[in-house]
Amino acid sequence: MAETIVRVESSSSPIALPSRPPDPCALVVFGVTGDLTRRKLVPALHALAQARELPERFALVGTSTSVGAAAELREKLRESTARFSRLQPFDEAAWGGFAGRIDAVQGDFNRPEAYAALRAKLEDAERRHGTGGNRLFYCAVPPAVYPVILRNLKQAGLLRAPGDGPWSRVVIEKPFGRDLASARELNRLLGEVLDEGQIFRIDHYLGKETVQNILVLRFGNSLFEPLWNHKYVDHVQITMAEEIGVEGRGKFYDQTGVLRDMIQSHVLQVLALCAMEPPVSFRADDIRDEKFKVLRALRPVAAGDTVRGRYLGYAREPGVAPGSRTPTYAALKLHVDNWRWQGVPFYIRSGKGLTKRRTEVSIHFSQIPFCLFGSEEVCARIEPNVLTLRIQPDEGIALRFGCKEPGDALSVGTVTMDFSYAASFKRPPGEAYERLLLDAMRGDATLFARRDADEQAWAFATPILESWDADPAPLPEYERGSVGPANADAWIHRDKRRWRPLA
Ligand code: BG6
C-alpha cells in the first residue's frame, strides 16, 4: 500500500516563558563587507528591527579594510539585505529607519592603530544612540584572524571586565580552531582576555527553531522519553545534506572540509541534544553540562566506520589547491558509550553537491519482537516505527507506524502522522541568527557552544582527521545532484540497514 500521510494541526494555546529583553548596545562587526554579514547578520538584524525586537537604543559599527564611508556601506547592505532577507517583499521604509543606526570605520584590524579610530567611532555611536556603553564585538572574519583582533581589543582597552557597569561580549564564529591543539590555543587566548561568560561561540544550528524543539519534544512530552534508549531504539540517523557546492568559498572550504565545517560543530551539537540525559533545569549550564557528557561518551571511531567522498568538479572550484584531498561528503558510525545508548549506532552523514537540501534526525525504533498476523508476507511488510525530526526545509515532525488497510483481508500498511511548522503555526520558523543575536545581547549563552564541549568535540574529531590525512587511497567521487558516494550505501548495508531516502 502506498504510504498514507495523516496531517496534524496545532491545538492548545502556547505557553510562553517570558524572555529577558535584549540590552541596549553597540554591535561592532569585524568583516562587515564579508559574506556572512551580507547574507546572514544584517538581514537578521533588519528583521529584528522590523519586528521591533531589536533594542531601541542600538547602533551598528561596521569595520573592514575596504568598507569606505558610512553612506556607501549602508547602500551595499541595503542591496544585500533586499536580496537575502527572509521578509519579502523588502520594505524600503523599514530599512530607512534601521540604516540610520549603521556607521562605518575603515581600518586594518591586524594593526593596533586601527583600534583608536574604532574607539572614536564607537564612542560617537554610543553618544548618538544612547547605548549605555554595552559593546558586542562580532568576529565575522576567518578564524585565523580572531587572535589578533582579541589581543588588539584588549590592548586598546575596549574590552571591559565583567562587573556592575556596561558589559563587553565577543561573538566568534565556528570553526573554533582546526584541531584539538589549535582549539585549545584559541580558548586559552580567549580565556586570557575574557571571562567564559563574555564569550559567545556561535553554532547557528543551535538557533534553528527545530533544533531547539528537540528538547521540547523529548522533555515536554511523556510519550517519547521512556522509549528513547537502547531498549526500543535500533539506530539513529542524522543527515545534513546540501545541494549547493562550495559557492565561491573554495579557499576556505579546501582548508576545512566536511568534518570541520559541518560534523565537528553542527552535527555533534544536534547529536548531543538528541542523546543527552534530562538536565536538572533549563538553565544554560545545566543543558550544556548534559551535552558535554554525551560528547565525552563518544567512542573513538574505528577505521572502517567512516566513508568519505567529494563531488565531481570540486577540484576545479576556484580556490581549491592542486592535488587537494579535501572531502565534501562524509558518513560516520558513532557510538555513545553510556547506559542509555549501549549498542545503538548513530549513523551521521553530511555532504555538499547532493540531490537535495535536507537536515533531519530520524529515530529508528526496533522491529516488533513477534508478528501475530499469520502469513510471512504480511509480517515482512511491517516496517519498524520511525520518528523523523525535519530540521529543514519543510520543518516538522513525522511518525511512521503500521496500520490495517481497510477491507476483509488482513493487510498491514504504513502510515505517517505529520506535523508541519508552517501549516500548524501559519508562519515559517524565524532565522537562526535572529534568535542568536538577541540572546548574545541579553547575555543568554544556552544556545552557544561552551569551551569544554568545543574541545571535547575536537578531541573526538582530530584522530579521524589524522587518520584521513594518513590514508593515501584516492577519494571516491560522486555526481553532483546524487545521494553521495556509492560506497556510502554499501557501507550501511553491511549493517543490514539503509539510509533514509534523500531524493
Ligand atoms: C555553515 C557552513 O556553518 O553552515 C556552510 O560553513 C554550510 O558550509 C552552512 O553551507 C549550512 O547552513 P544552513 O543553515 O544553510 O543549513
Image (spheres, rainbow, N blue to C red):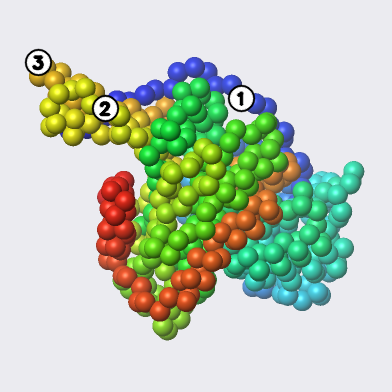
Tag 3: amino acid: Asp
Residue depicted at 55% across the width and 43% down the height: 338
The residues tagged by marks 1 and 2 sit, at their Cα atoms, a distance apart of: 44 Å
Residue depicted at 86% across the width and 55% down the height: 160
| Left or right for 388, reference 183 | left
Between circles 3 and 1, the one closer to the viewer is: 3
**Secondary-structure class at tag 3:** loop
Instruction: From the image, tell me which residue sits under label 1.
Output: 16
Tag 2: amino acid: Phe
Q: Quadrant of residue 14?
A: top right
Residue depicted at 43% across the width and 48% down the height: 346
Figure check: 14 above or below 97: above
Label 3 Cα crowd, 10 Å radius (few <14 / some 14-19 / many 20+): few
**Could you say which is closer to the camera, residue 382 or residue 414?**
382
Tag 1: amino acid: Ala
The image shows residue 289 at horizontal and vertical percentages of: 67, 42
| Left or right for 16, reference 477 | right
**Could you say which is closer to the camera, residue 428 or residue 346?**
346
**Secondary-structure class at tag 2:** loop
Q: In which quarter of the image is residue 143?
A: bottom right
Q: Quadrant of residue 486?
A: bottom left
**Could you say which is closer to the camera, residue 332 or residue 267?**
332
| Of callouts 3 and 1, the N-terminal one | 1
The image shows residue 74 at horizontal and vertical percentages of: 62, 59
The image shows residue 481 at horizontal and vertical percentages of: 29, 60
The residues tagged by marks 3 and 1 sit, at their Cα atoms, a distance apart of: 48 Å
Instruction: From the image, tell me which residue sits under label 3.
Output: 408
